[in-house]
Image (spheres, rainbow, N blue to C red):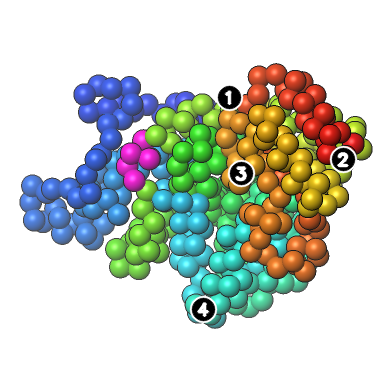
């Protein structure tokens, strides 16, 4: 693939109000007009370059949105106050009462909880399927289906979606393919593979410093305009607006994403290969043992690797907890949810980030008690990290 997402970010050039190399932060909630007619035109969406109220848009948020759209290769983007603040408006904008969603069965717990428990209040129903089997996905589509929803690399089982195959299904049945690309920024470019809407939790790899939450919806100008409409736009009316100071901070961190993703991927690949050689049940898209290894390889922007996420199964929750507690004690990382930090983060997703999924469904999808999800950090000496982790595993009786 010739698409180069990091180049698109690099090529954006902004000057601050006083010639600064960073754009000036628009620290205002509301904006003044020189004429009443311009205010009216702005309300109607007919005054480009004018700002009305920061819940609608602000210069800082538009700078960040423009950069993220460039990264994903979409016409534009809208940033939000959290990842869920991006996901929920997209579903509600695309679906109404009586509509149906076909979703991957392995998705972030908050997304699952919204589709399973909250959306039915709006008379929106969801079928959860094995997204890796296109025939099963197609069989779940009904006359009321409006959206196919998946994650490029699923949380937490690291299943890989065939985005081109899903895009073909979406076109065949006149559906919208919505892809959450949080686990694989730069590595995979869903819009270039046929996705209609691309979502990220900016909280994770894109920001990279675990100091803020944020989200983004990348798509066509028409769809983003619909989300922002003062009359019936889900982003506008639900109010999940990003703060300008946070938008400015994330934009600065975005500029180093390509370097960070290369190191995250390098370190995760090293550890995954070592863990697998120890006989541990290891899941990482970069391993040839991963069932979708070749699919990921065919889709990826190769210089960014297979991402920073891996899982191992140590057999039981007690062993998982003992290992994580010892690794934290040895300063190998943090027993914490989320991902994309400079230090390694680890958690047992069955009792944390995927706890919203009932135990019987966790078991059905292969989410076992002993599963540990790792977000591998930016360690400079990954061999040292591995040796220390190996020693921890011996101490708790896993090896």
| 213 sits to left or right of 348 | left
Name the N-terminal-most of marks 3 and 2: 3
Residue 156: horizontal and vertical position, in percent?
70, 51
Report the Cα–Cα distance between label 1 and label 2: 33 Å
Name the N-terminal-most of marks 4 and 1: 4
In this rendering, the answer to whether 376 lies above or below 194 is above
- Residue picked out by circle 4: 121
Residue 268: horizontal and vertical position, in percent?
73, 32
- Residue picked out by circle 3: 336
- Residue picked out by circle 1: 259
Looking at the picture, tell me which residue is in the foreground, 195 or 399. Answer: 399
Q: Locate the C terminus by quadrant.
A: top right
Name the N-terminal-most of marks 4 and 3: 4
- Residue picked out by circle 2: 398
Report the Cα–Cα distance between label 2 and label 4: 45 Å
Q: Looking at the image, which residue is at 77% across and 21% down? A: 383
Q: Looking at the image, which residue is at 47% across and 55% down? A: 86
């Amino acid at each position: 693939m010739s698409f180069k997402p990091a180049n698109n970010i690099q090529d954006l050039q902004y000057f601050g109000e006083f010639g600064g190399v960073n754009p000036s932060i628009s620290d205002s909630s509301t904006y003044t007009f020189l004429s009443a007619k311009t205010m009216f035109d702005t309300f109607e969406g007919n005054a480009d370059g004018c700002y009305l109220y920061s819940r609608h848009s602000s210069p800082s948020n538009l700078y960040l949105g423009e950069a993220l759209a460039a990264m994903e290769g979409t016409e534009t983007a809208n940033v939000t106050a959290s990842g869920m603040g991006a996901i929920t408006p997209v579903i509600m904008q695309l679906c109404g009462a009586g509509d149906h969603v076909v979703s991957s069965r392995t998705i972030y717990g908050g997304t699952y909880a919204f589709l399973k428990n909250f959306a039915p209040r709006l008379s929106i129903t969801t079928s959860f399927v094995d997204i890796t089997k296109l025939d099963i996905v197609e069989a779940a589509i009904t006359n009321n289906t409006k959206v196919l929803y998946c994650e490029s690399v699923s949380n937490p089982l690291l299943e890989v979606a065939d985005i081109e195959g899903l895009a073909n299904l979406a076109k065949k049945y006149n559906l919208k393919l919505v892809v959450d690309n949080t686990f694989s920024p730069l590595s995979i470019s869903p819009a270039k593979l046929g996705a209609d809407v691309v979502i990220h939790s900016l909280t994770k790899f894109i920001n990279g410093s675990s100091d803020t939450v944020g989200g983004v919806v990348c798509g066509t100008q028409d769809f983003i305009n619909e989300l922002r409409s003062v009359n019936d736009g889900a982003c506008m009316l639900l109010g999940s607006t990003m703060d300008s100071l946070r938008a400015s901070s994330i934009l600065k961190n975005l500029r180093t994403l390509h370097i960070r993703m290369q190191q995250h991927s390098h370190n995760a690949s090293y550890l995954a290969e070592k863990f697998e050689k120890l006989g541990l049940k290891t899941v990482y898209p970069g391993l040839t043992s991963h069932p979708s290894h070749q699919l990921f390889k065919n889709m990826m922007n190769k210089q960014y690797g297979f991402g920073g996420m891996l899982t191992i199964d140590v057999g039981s929750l007690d062993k998982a907890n003992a290992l994580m507690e010892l690794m934290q004690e040895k300063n190998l990382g943090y027993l914490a949810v989320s991902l994309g930090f400079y230090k390694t983060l680890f958690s047992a997703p069955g009792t944390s980030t995927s706890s919203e999924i009932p135990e019987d469904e966790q078991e059905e999808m292969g989410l076992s008690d002993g599963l540990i999800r790792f977000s591998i950090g930016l360690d400079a000496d990954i061999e040292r990290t591995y040796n220390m982790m190996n020693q921890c595993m011996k101490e708790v009786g896993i090896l």
